[in-house]
Amino acid sequence: MQLLTLVIILAATLSGYLADMHIAPSGFRFLPEALAVLALAVVLVVGPRQRFKLVGARYWILFAATAAIVVAGVVINAVAPGTFIGGARYYLRAIPMFLVPAVMDLTETQLRTQLRLLLGIALLQLPISLYQRHQVTELERWSGDPVVGTLGISSILSIFMIAGICIAAAMALRGRLSKLSFIALFVLFIIPTTINETKSTVLLLPLGLLTTLMLGSQRGRRTRNVAWALGLLVLFGALYVPVYDYYATLNNPYPYTVESFFSDSKTVEGYVDQGTDLGSRREAGRWDSLEVPLRTFSSDPVRLMFGVGIGNASVSALGSRYTGEYNVLLGRYTAVSSGGAFLVEIGVLGLAMVMLAYWLSLRDAIFVALRDSTLVGALALGWAGVTVVLAIATYYKTLHAFESLSFLFWYLLGVIAAQRMRLTERKAPATASAATAPLRTTLRSTR
């Protein structure tokens, strides 16, 4: 199972890039999904023997409720089978990864190998993104959008690197990474997020880093860690601002700086809210992807709750014949962010289930981080920051459409959720023993 997991990690982060570069056949991009099916088959064979004892009841309830919402939306809207299959591919393909850690006896050595592989993949993004930035400059273009590393689009690359910073910070706090090594990784991970001009880094990095550092602060060290965090953010600003400004003005017929962008309220407002309406031909903004569907469905409580059906407002990878019937009307909103896509296709209830998954992820990460001194505990500490970043980024990009984030999210959440169940099981006998102590004393006194 370890080998399969390592191959899936590689496939989720590299297969699309290899196919795009024609290093591998175009069908290679579907390798993560094929491997996920194989992983699911293993889970279905091994899991029942173990009664899935490492999967908490709260997750079964979450999955059952989500499935009921999806089925209700499909039935209510009479979604065509082909459309449903195309939509389900994006929504459900990564979930089997959550169950993998629950059926494998994951050792610390195996987890360390997996994290080292992820570190190598993260470091690989630096030379590739530098080369991509060089190509943009050579062609006298100005947008950082082509600087994507191996992860498809620039914003997903940035979110991936920010997640890496959160986990590296946790490892440094737990003494598993020296401060000098962490600072070096911090700089190396920041460079790709800077040269691709991802504005969201300004918000997501501080939130993820501060969450990790504050949660990992021991008594008496919180002030020191806050100072560390502020120092890192100053270092981030010293790198990010001048590099971003240089590339944002180079060869750009509409030059601007990051300072001018965020200091102009009209520019920021226009970036978030394009002021589109139903049927508008303009590109939708982040706020539009939420506000317009809510306003559209406000007079139809059923669709407001359950959406128009999974895949029914999206472009299908199976071809135009399977594209959802609501794509022309609402497709521009599903293409902006996962939050918009969920709201349109699985409704308010479906979006609520997604946010509940993030809440469970955060709770389990905090629980394990505070009680586990092993490598999983250190990972859980960083995972708390990653969860905050991903929860916010759900309203920024279509995270569920990218294997690099969705597969890793469900797998690493599975690692932490399984560890919480192990910790709970270890605590249960002691708790039961303490609870029966008065009864034993009473029995002895009556003899």
Image (cartoon, rainbow, N blue to C red):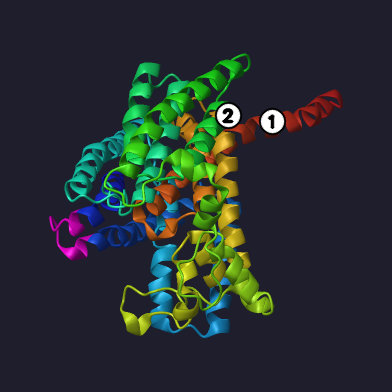
Q: CA distance from mark 1 to mark 2?
A: 31 Å
Q: If you read the primary sequence from the N terminus, does the residue marked by circle 1 or circle 2 appear first?
A: 2
State the residue lying farthest toward the left. 23
At 44% from the left edge and 59% from the top edge, which residue is drawn? 398
Q: Quadrant of the C terminus?
A: top right
Residue 403 drawn above or below residue 132: below
* Label 2 neighbour load within 10 Å: few <14, some 14-19, many 20+: some
Q: Are marks 1 and 2 in contact (CB under 8 Å)?
A: no
159 and 84: which one is in front? 159
The residue lying at 49 percent from left, 73 percent from top is: 310
* Residue 416 appears in the rendering: no
The residue identified by callout 2 is 215
Which image quadrant is residue 160 in? top left
Residue toward you, 57 or 119: 119
Kind of residue at disc 2: Leu
Query: Position of 322 compared to 396: left or right?
Result: left
How many residues crowd mark 1 within 10 Å: few (<14), some (14–19), many (20+)?
Answer: few
* Identity, as a three-letter code, of the amino acid under mark 1: Ser
Q: Which residue is mark 1?
A: 433
Give how far across and how far down residue 191 sits, in percent: 32, 35
Left or right of 161, for residue 124: left
Q: Is residue 445 visible?
A: yes
The structure residue drawn at horizontal position 60% and vertical position 73%, both measured from the top left corner, is 306
Horizontal and vertical percent for residue 371? Answer: 57, 28
- Residue 420 is covered by the magenta coloring: no
Q: Nearer the viewer, residue 139 or 336?
A: 139
Residue at the image position 33 percent from the left and 53 percent from the top:
153
Residue 68 is drawn in which quadrant? bottom right
Question: What stretch of residues is rendered in magenta?
Answer: 18-28
In front of the other: label 1 or label 2?
2
On whether residue 26 falls in the magenta region, the answer is yes
Give the farthest residue toward the right. Answer: 446
